[in-house]
Image (tube, rainbow, N blue to C red):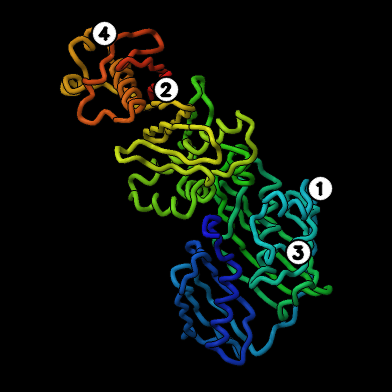
Amino acid sequence: PADLHPVVPMTMLVRLMMEAAQQVAQGKVAISAVDVEAFKWLVAVPPQEVEISAHPLTSEPQPGRETVRVSLGEFARADIILADAYPAPPPPSPLDLTCPEASPVDAHTLYADRWMFHGPRYQGVVELGPLGEEGIHGEIVAPSGPGALLDNAGQIFGYWVMARHDRDRLAMPQRIRRIDLFAPEPAPGERLSCDVWIRLVEAREVIADLQLMHQGAVWCRVEGWNDYRFESDPRMWEVMLHPERNRLSDPEPGGWLLYDDRRWRAPTRDWLARRYLSQQERQAMRDSGPRRARSWLHGRIVAKDAVRHWLWEAGAGPIFPIEVTIHHDPEGAPLLRAPTDADLRISISHCEDLAVALVREGTNPGIDVERVAPRDESFLDMTLTDGERALLPQSDPDGEQITRFWCAKEAAAKARKKGLGSSPRSYVITQVDPNRLRADGLWVQTRRMGDHMVAWTE
């Protein structure tokens, strides 16, 4: 279960904060949650102990009402308003859609195809649509999970973002301005209708108001529900939904794969880590330190994609990224484990936002990627023999050819399962062709890609 990174829904945190406030203001019921903020994921497995603090505010409350400020550890905070009884519900507000459309996805598909990743106690949406530019209507059968009913309303809101956009489609709650309740929560199995009004759509956030109706009366109104939009393109969206059938890395001529991370921000990378890495791998990434964690993730993504791509080309079925693991021998060379009897071997390299991986069966591959840059005389003296320096062109203003030589040596050293270490001159280049070099007796293909050079063993 920990590999799946289960987290507590934001609405369950609201439920816990309301219960804590009711313990402080005994005899009263929580009728509103104001300025709800979720700061970080509360991971459910392994279990955690979280300190809840609840303190009445000193400001003069309305007659018969009390406000309690509740903090749920470092994870969430809200002001909870309590009263002797629920207020009378307001008149329902109609959802007027100028151009209503049927939903392209039905409620069953919402969960079956993983548009929503919630477990069965949080799967209560039974109808989706109509929807339009202004919002969406949905129907909910109240589920049994704590806070699940409000979570289902948020799912309908989140689905609107998915249905109306082809980029940055994943939206997760981060704050809510106000939640007002007008009756006790309906029992599991009760049916409610949900209307969502879209108030603001921007690059990184979308804000909506929501209304839930039960037996013809307003049960709950939400103002200013703010979702954060994670970056995604159509390809990443497919990986988010079905990582066992899709990959992020691109196959390149020569049989190696390239992963380019320049498009994504930190929250999206965090999401990718939970799609590609097991719990133990996520811990290993954190242990690598903040400076190396990003390149560590890049290397694992491209390596897992390269192995799965090889297996899919050989006719394999669905393979989740965490079914492929990378270990290292005592010299630091990567060793892989995968759901196959084939003798697969891998080489990995990363530089800045790029990562590359090469898989071969029954033979050790080598691959390297480096930024093209001029090199000084001390680097040349350390790297090249006199014979190799004679093979370089007289003019190499941006350092392309010396970078090419360096990459070829790195690739050859990896194929020998040694690495360059302190002896790059021992991997001697003896022949230079337009698209390949002979290094330490191995033919190494090379290709410039923008500001980077890639070299890989044939």
SS under mark 3 = strand
Query: Which residue position is annotated with label 4?
Result: 391
Q: Position of residue 210 (x, y in %)?
A: 70, 64
Q: Residues within 10 Å of mark 2 (few under 14, many from 20)?
A: few
- Mark 3 vs mark 4, CA separation in Å: 72 Å
| Drawn side of residue 116 relative to residue 369, left or right | right
Q: Earlier in the sequence, mark 1 or mark 4?
A: 1
* Tag nearer the camera, 1 or 2: 2
Identify the residue shown where x is 48% and y is 32%: 344
- Type of the residue with mark 4: Leu
- Residue under label 2: 450
In the displayed structure, 14 sits above or below 28; it is above
What secondary structure is found at the residue carrying circle 4? helix
Structural distance between the alpha carbons of marks 2 and 4 = 23 Å
Q: Residue at x 71, y 81 (%)?
A: 184
Q: Where 251 falls versus 6 (above or below)?
A: above
User: Seen from this angle, which residue lies furthest front?
Assistant: 341
Q: Position of residue 442 (x, y in %)?
A: 35, 16
Q: What numbered label is drawn on residue 455?
A: none
